[in-house]
């Protein structure tokens, strides 16, 4: 498997939202880097100063179980569900002896420096492109949502203005605004004196 074998859609399917952050599981990263998960985690443990908690953290048992449950419910017992089950399974079931670690975008960027292989560099480039693409798609969706809200509001205003009932309500609201104005603003004072000529 070479760098081209880690396309953006594959990487994107391995990104999860945990604790409000987009992360990749250590087992998924090790598969992409073509190293054992144990090897990846050993390289990280040898360089603890490079991986603060906003770069990498360990899942709680509840988070691992929730992730496993989400996957089984959404996909049935597919290959992805089996992969995730193996990545997060409890000890004694042929799985891991500890909860998985997850890496944020910054943690993934740091991984290429501790793994030091050409493969790690190429995979990291693909992962960074994936994160950039996801941010771009999210920004596009937010912009579209704002535009739809604006169009919807304009249509409501136009409908309200065209509707005879809406016009009467608008007149009533304008009259109420006038009545609620302070008295000195509500009166139309007359000028006293001669007009300037």
Image (tube, rainbow, N blue to C red):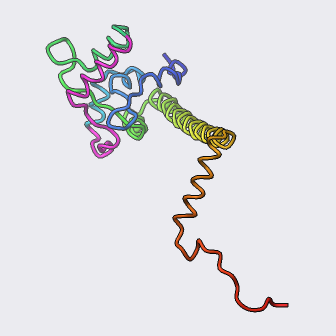
| On-image quarter of the C terminus | bottom right
Residue 52 lies in quadrant:
top left
Q: Residue furthest left?
A: 92
* In this picture, residue 184 sits left or right of residue 99: right
Q: Residue furthest right?
A: 197
Image location (x, y in percent) of residue 40: 32, 28
Image location (x, y in percent) of residue 113: 41, 38
Residue 100 lies in quadrant:
top left
Q: Is residue 74 magenta?
A: yes
Number of marks in the image? 0
Image location (x, y in percent) of residue 61: 20, 27
Q: Is residue 45 magenta?
A: no
**Residue at 61% of width from left, 50% of height from top?**
170
**Residue at 54% of width from left, 68% of height from top?**
181
* In this picture, residue 104 sits left or right of residue 182: left
Q: Relative to residue 52, is residue 196 depicted above or below? A: below
Magenta-colored span:
46-75
Residue 103 lies in quadrant:
top left
* In this picture, residue 181 sits left or right of residue 75: right
Q: Relative to residue 137, is residue 34 depicted above or below? A: above
* In this picture, residue 89 sits left or right of residue 137: left
Q: Relative to residue 165, is residue 184 depicted above or below? A: below
**Residue at 34% of width from left, 17% of height from top?**
71
**Magenta span main SS:** helix
């Amino acid at each position: 498997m070479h760098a081209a074998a880690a396309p953006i859609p594959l990487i994107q399917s391995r990104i999860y939202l945990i604790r409000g952050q987009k992360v990749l599981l250590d087992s998924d990263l090790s598969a992409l880097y073509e190293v054992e998960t144990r090897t990846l985690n050993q390289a990280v443990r040898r360089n603890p100063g490079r991986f603060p908690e906003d770069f990498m953290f360990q899942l709680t048992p509840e988070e691992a179980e929730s992730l496993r449950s989400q996957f089984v419910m959404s996909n049935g017992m597919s290959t992805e569900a089996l992969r995730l089950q193996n990545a997060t399974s409890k000890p004694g079931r042929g799985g891991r002896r500890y909860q998985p670690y997850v890496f944020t975008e910054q943690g993934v960027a740091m991984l290429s420096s501790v793994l030091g292989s050409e493969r790690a560099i190429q995979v990291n480039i693909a992962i960074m492109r994936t994160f950039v693409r996801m941010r771009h798609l999210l920004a596009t969706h937010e912009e579209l949502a704002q535009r739809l809200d604006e169009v919807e509001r304009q249509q409501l205003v136009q409908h309200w203005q065209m509707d005879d009932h809406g016009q009467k309500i608008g007149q009533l609201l304008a009259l109420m605004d006038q009545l609620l104005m302070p008295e000195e603003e509500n009166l139309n004072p007359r000028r006293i004196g001669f007009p300037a000529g």
